[in-house]
Amino acid sequence: MEKPLSLPARLFRRAPRVNLVRLQGMIAARGTNALNDAALAPVLERAFRAGRPKAVALAINSPGGSPAQSSLIAARIRALADETGVQVHAFVEDVAASGGYWLASAADDIHCDACSILGSIGVISAGFGFHELIDRHGIERRIHTAGRSKSQLDLFCPEKPEDVERLNRLLEQLHETFITEIRARRGAKLSTEAELFDGSYWLGSEAVELGLADGIGHARAVLRERYGKKVRIVPYGVRRSLMSRLGLGQAGAQMAEAALIAAEERALRARLGV
């Protein structure tokens, strides 16, 4: 039988601590508000080590983005979890789609809202072609390369079948890597009666039925149920300077880049209906 704690021990016993990291936005190697491994590395290090946490919670709201950055961030989360022995819980807000779901899968369990969107396990490459436009205006495209494939998929030249075939091979390889990672993390939880890897996405309740998530629940309620009503939830995030938060001190190129990333994120979210 466990010996009851003395009064001094009860008085000085600290409430369980869970450090919460917010992963919100598009996943991209660069950008003021983008999620990437370089920016998140120090945040995740602190979250897994500061204050001897019982767990780390991930509040995820991301439509996806870069496959490489998704893989790097997820791998860092798992490495830190293994090093520290700290459990990881993911809580999906509006959306964890594509790379956003890759991040969620790094957790030991995933909870979401009934209205959350999860899935979109696929890879996409999108762009524009302007060769007919410039032809109509009498503009001649001049491009010189060393290397037969250096100018493949040039926006101002007609598509070549061999270039499209090469791109499709790359997309299939990326897709297979994505699928392998999700299967490794979710394992037997995944439904075998539905096609989960064709880029489709689902609302929270159906995502739970399909094994893409473990339950419907919000961070505060789930963590209080698991770690007690006195659990301390301590937020962590990327530290930005006051000038950056006010949008000051950015060069024109940086501001343009941030605007492009914001537009791309809006396009991704619009495709998902959020």
Image (cartoon, grey):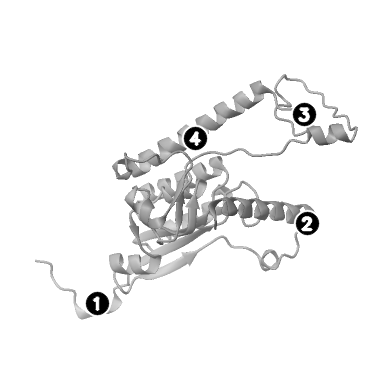
Q: Name the front one of labels 3 and 4.
A: 3
Q: Amino acid at mark 2?
A: Ala
Q: Earlier in the sequence, mark 1 or mark 2?
A: 1
- Mark 3: few, some, or many residues within 10 Å (few <14, many ≥20)? some
- Mark 2: few, some, or many residues within 10 Å (few <14, many ≥20)? few
Q: Residue at x 61, y 24 (%)?
A: 166
Q: Nearer the viewer, residue 65 or 141?
A: 141
- Which residue in the structure is indicated by mark 4? 175
Q: Earlier in the sequence, mark 1 or mark 4?
A: 1
Q: Earlier in the sequence, mark 2 or mark 3?
A: 3
Q: Label 4, secondary structure: give it.
A: helix
- Which residue in the structure is indicated by mark 2? 251
- Which residue in the structure is indicated by mark 1? 10
Q: Name the front one of labels 2 and 4.
A: 4
Q: Position of residue 116 (x, y in %)?
A: 45, 58
Drawn side of residue 5 relative to residue 42, left or right: left
